Image (tube, grey):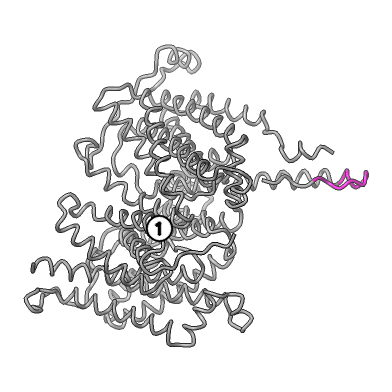
Amino acid sequence: MQEFLQQLVGGLAIGGIFASLALALVLIYNAMGLVNFAQGEMAMLATFVAYALVSQGMSYWIAFPVTLVLAFAGGIGVQRLVIKPVERAPILTLVIITLGLATLVNGLAGFIWGYVPRSFPSPFSSDSVDLVGVFVSYRDLGVIAVSGIVLLAVYLLLQRTTVGLTLRAAAHHPEASRLLGVHVSWMLALGWGLASAVGAVSGIMVAPILLLEPNMMQSIIIYAFAAAVLGGIESPPGAVVGGLIVGVTINLAGAYLPFVGGDLQLAVGLAIIIGVLILKPNGLFGRAAVRRV
Amino acid sequence: MNLQRIRMAPPRYWLVGVVVLFLIGFPTVISSFLASEWAQALILAIAIMGLNILVGYSGQLSLGHGAFMALGAYISAILAHHYKVDYLLTIPIAGLATGLVGFLFGIPALRLSPLYLALATFALAVVTPSLIKRPAGLTGGVQGIGVVQPDPPGAVSNIFSTITGTAMTSDQWIYYVSLFCALVLFWVAWNIVRHRPGRAMRAIRDGEVAAAASGVNVRGFKTLAFGLSAFYGGVAGSLYGLSTGFVSPDTFPVSLSIQLLVGAVVGGLASIPGPLAGAIFAYFLPIESSQWVPNQSWIPAQIAATVKNAGPAVSYGVILIVIMIFAPNGLVGLARSGYSLLNRRLRGATDRETGQMPPDPQTV
């Protein structure tokens, strides 16, 4: 029972990381109906930036927000430079472009920093604390706390501020928003920046666990896809719940299902994606899609 | 004016003839090693043609076509290794079995929007290597399975050695096997896309509701496209194992699926010559960018070193983005619009005298 609870907490911690990346996917999906295949690679690049800052001697807690700001600016830059010219193109074109972006960013990181895995500092010690009989590492608790704060901040931004309201309006009713004086195209850019920053959190949180290298996010993005699809790809709370469920599921499956083990955890992610898409394509929190003929 | 003939411009048979003769004669003048590289480019062309049928003609986006190649390669390797079947015989078996799997995969894919399909197939491509490793007794686990490359049959070898004066290597024989498969499969694809199934697929791609209203069996043709495309992938995978001499999980990484997509997009979606051009491009770009570019004196050393180190990933990414933004119809589209521009210029001059308007440019 105790081991089960420990696996559960570990699953929640890794699930919080998936939730951040899934939330980034949802933000861009809501803004323009697109799944950004480059989200994981952008987060990886941001993590390398944080690594560079920390190894220059900057303190972790300063490097962290600085990286988020840089990621935010980078996300806006990507939207202006690459996505804006094809905003109205068919979805196929957009998906291929984000894949190109993913390949490009991956190659760029490999070119600058190489493919040797590096250890990434974690501000939390790996000691454990006894929480009513369950030993939980500070690192897991810290990851859960940071993810929770970020998700809460995004929620407050979207629901309680004028910027959030404008963002949502531009995403849901671009025409009406334009008539009311909202600069829709810049709101899309803002959405990309926000997604990029939220995704960067997941990269920085996962790097101490996985070791930092250009292909680090390749499996995480699959879990984030699973989380976003499970939660309903247009629902921010769904991404969070989906992320936590996926995290707990793969942790428990890896620990208790002998045929899954460590090496087929990724296949569990694939199974969740395909299962949800076939059985309940709108996910847990999504609305049924209404198609205009 | 015969508009019909302008719209359905006949393929330029002489060009096809030149390309085919070139591909047949090429290995007699290049080294055996180069022939094996060209064989792999042709094999990629087959897989890209499969992807092109699916993405270009039926409008379903698959990002995991490397998985179908892996399946075909492993079916062939397992049949040849465990059951001692002649490898060349396993190629059609692998193609058909993979095609069947693709057909079955196409049924749940019907329910998915294009975006979700892209997502699911991408996840499949990422998971494929770890799925292959698991049944280690059958697939050889991480090591994979060795494939014995066949010696060329006597008759073919004799003809080859009378022309070139040297004995035919198995690499050269594999080149001709690949070329034969590529020619047959390109011919089949050409016949499919300009007849009823091709028209149906294009109608579905351009408007599913309109196609259904016109009596097109949408579900049937979408799954057919998936099956066909997987068949091409399976044959290509089987040939791929033959030409590399082994199959292992790392032969089929995600980057292979990306490479296929790059080839399809660069060559030009929904065209028959596109996959060949795209395959040659996608196959030789990474090789040449690490070998040819650094040895060119006219390219500044700094740029050459950057190209070499940044590797294929950066150039692939940049090319995908640039092509999608500026030339969504790929190399073939560029060539076509260049040709029709030239044509219009020339014809526009004469038409000014007769007072006739030049005909509409050809629509794709």
Element type at mark 1: helix
Where residue A286 sits, quadrant-wise, is bottom left
Does the rendering let one see residue A114? no
Find the residue positioned furthest to the left. Answer: A133
Residue B354 appears left or right of B282: right
Q: Is residue B158 above or below residue A132?
A: above
Q: Residue at image x 76%, y 39%?
A: B6
Please state which of residues A96 and B212 is positioned toward the viewer in this rendering: B212
Residue A49 appears left or right of B218: left
Amino acid type assigned to the residue bearing label 1 in the image: Gly
Q: Is residue B360 above or below residue A100?
A: above
Q: How packed is label 1: few (under 14 Cα within 10 Å), some, or many (20 or more)?
A: many
Please state which of residues B246 and A218 is positioned toward the viewer in this rendering: A218
Please state which of residues A53 and B52 is positioned toward the viewer in this rendering: B52
Where residue A159 sits, quadrant-wise, is bottom left
Residue that label 1 marks:
A107
Q: Residue at image x 10%, y 78%?
A: A129
Residue A254: give x, y in percent of width and height: 18, 57
- Magenta span of residues: B349-359
Residue B73: give x, y in percent of width and height: 34, 35
Residue B280 in magenta stretch? no
Residue A207: give x, y in percent of width and height: 27, 67
Image quadrant where one finds the N terminus of chain A:
bottom left
Please state which of residues B257 and B127 is positioned toward the viewer in this rendering: B127
Q: Is residue B259 above or below residue A249?
A: above
Q: How many circles with numbers are drawn on the protein?
A: 1
Image quadrant where one finds the C terminus of chain A:
bottom right
Residue B176: give x, y in percent of width and height: 46, 24
Find the residue positioned furthest to the bottom. Answer: A161
**Dot 1: chain letter:** A
Does the rendering let one see residue B97? yes
